[in-house]
Image (cartoon, coloured by chain):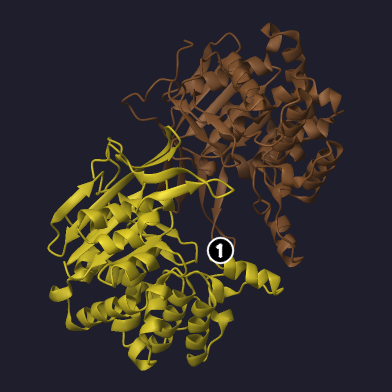
Chain colours: A brown, B yellow
Amino acid sequence: MSSSAPQSDSGSPNPVLVEVTRGDLVESRHRAAVAVVDAAGSVLMSAGNIGHPVYPRSAIKQLQALALVESGAAEAFGCSDAEITLACASHNGEPRHVEVAQAWLKRLGLSETDLECGAHAPKDTTAAEALLRAGESPTTLHNNCSGKHVGYLATALHLGAPTRGYIRIEHPVQQRILGILEMMSGCELRNAPRGIDGCGIPQIAIPLSHVALAFAQFADPVDQPERRQAACERICSAMAAHPFLVAGSNRFCTRVMEATQGRVLVKTGAEGVFSIILPEMGIGVALKIDDGATRAAEVAAGRVLEKLNLIDDDARAALSDLLVQPVKNVVGRQVGQVRVAQDSPF
Amino acid sequence: MSSSAPQSDSGSPNPVLVEVTRGDLVESRHRAAVAVVDAAGSVLMSAGNIGHPVYPRSAIKQLQALALVESGAAEAFGCSDAEITLACASHNGEPRHVEVAQAWLKRLGLSETDLECGAHAPKDTTAAEALLRAGESPTTLHNNCSGKHVGYLATALHLGAPTRGYIRIEHPVQQRILGILEMMSGCELRNAPRGIDGCGIPQIAIPLSHVALAFAQFADPVDQPERRQAACERICSAMAAHPFLVAGSNRFCTRVMEATQGRVLVKTGAEGVFSIILPEMGIGVALKIDDGATRAAEVAAGRVLEKLNLIDDDARAALSDLLVQPVKNVVGRQVGQVRVAQDSPF
């Protein structure tokens, strides 16, 4: 794999990896690219154009959390595994998620008004409805990225940088993260395409194969500096111990990590991105659905795990409604499914 | 255009018609097929594989409502234009929608328990939150298809058929609709792929070009039997007069119909389908986004209207955030857009 700057789109479209059926017909189709890579940069499996740059969105929160741990901020503030996991989470805004974020913020001497992510309703319907029924409004703590933002604030404090403006590309925290992304992905990213994420932080486009490489190095950090190696291991063990905090009730990431006893670290990102870290195998995976659909990204991520023989019979039983996702109508009758496409090359 | 049974997929993928940008990068892409057809079956414009069968979903509610009107049920029960429009709606479940459905049901001597569509929260967030804050639960009246279902019940009563089971393919109401679809689309549909819609009724797959043909014949029903011609005209004028009832607050269908003073009748369907009836031009349009995304279907529908010169300067100003849709982050800052793809062939 070359370490070149992000490449432009090639001519041939990505293959259809996931299809949505209803009765007799395939009703909708999702195209995707998938890269399965080891820490030496060898592409072990792939589908589609893996040289195309993508925004990894929330699927790289573990890489972003390296700044928190390797800067020494996590140690200085006595961060628990739960807090480190929440820094890597796209959580449901359930009471437990809010509680961890709130206590951590308080220990930093800060409050929810210091979070620059904005407020949105909890992703978990039960939590969102409970808030409404109680006549309350969502705060920045309910934002699915609140843990990541508390982590940024902790890092800023530890670096002696201003807390205000920590989401801007010029801020020392974001610059540190940019450096980490360059080292881990093997890409020079200064001139890479750039945008703003849903929670306000910079997003940097990285070729999909290099996103996978970054996660392979995370899974197998033996060639990394000692501090980074320790940080990768700490984050992996924290996430493995707290799958609920990574996402929440009935979420794909949480359920897959539970069913695989933490051997598989999966992380969703907006617009159909997924990352997978496989510490035991030293493998990193990145995938992107062309059209941005989460339903397809989940089914494709499940397929990758199946192909890598990481889903045993117990896990397959526990995850049956995620590996092949039922399409139900309003009264709850199954009328179709989201599944790996019958002619999928992957 | 042949009147053959639905054809299978051809080899070449549909073109990218809509793209989603974020900062410097096109982050996601949506492929689609579009057919613009006149009542003689001439394809005036097209993109992609228009011979591929699709479920037209809620985009054919106007065709389904023909049974209500041409059977004489609408006249027998003194249906208002508002009620006929609601039979064609995928509404927001706002108070006005619920009120029209409820009063109509009551006049039929029936209640919400006779609706077999199931209950879901109002699509309109304000209405959904108000319901929760009031400690109430959604009923079948809030189902976006409730008007269509009341129309089916009225038709069943008028035909002397049982009301229970009116959603089943064997029921006389559904058989009537199947006959209408065959006549209007010019397709023999007995052996067409079939599935169940979100609201429980049958969905029949029809080649996209023939869905467009059905709407062209709706727009220009001069060759139809007199009763059907009158029914098409009644439904068009009812919808044109009640755009709010077709969808609701800040919805694409409602806003486009308002901005074009009812000259353009647009109707969304699940999984990225849209239909357009253009009575003045005698044209029907059907489009389907491959992956099922509504954001892309709306932008593609807007593009068709632009290409047909149906968007004047006032309409363009009124619809600017629908023709090119802003992508905003949580704090409301625009960070990208959903737009016609720069290399779109359409």
Chain letter for mark 1, please.
Answer: A
Residue A309, x across and y down, in percent: 63, 24
Q: Is residue A202 above or below residue A111?
A: above
Name the residue nearer the viewer: B67 or B305: B305
Q: Quadrant of the N terminus of chain B?
A: bottom left
On the picture, is A190 further left or further right than B211? right
On the picture, is A242 further left or further right than B194? right
Residue B23, x across and y down, in percent: 45, 35
Q: Is residue B196 above or below residue B110?
A: above
Res B76 visible: yes
Residue B203, x across and y down, in percent: 40, 61
Name the residue nearer the viewer: A110 or A335: A110
Residue at image mark 1: A330
- Quadrant location of residue B255? bottom left
Q: Residue, x 49% and y 77% (percent of image)?
A: B97
Residue A102, x across and y down, in percent: 81, 44
Res B119 visible: no
Q: Residue, x 24% and y 58% (percent of image)?
A: B210
Q: Residue, x 27% and y 67% (percent of image)?
A: B264
- CA neighbours of label 1 inside 10 A, class few (<14), some (14 to 19), many (20+): some
Q: Quadrant of the C terminus of chain B?
A: top left
Q: Amino acid under label 1?
A: Val
Label 1 SS:
loop
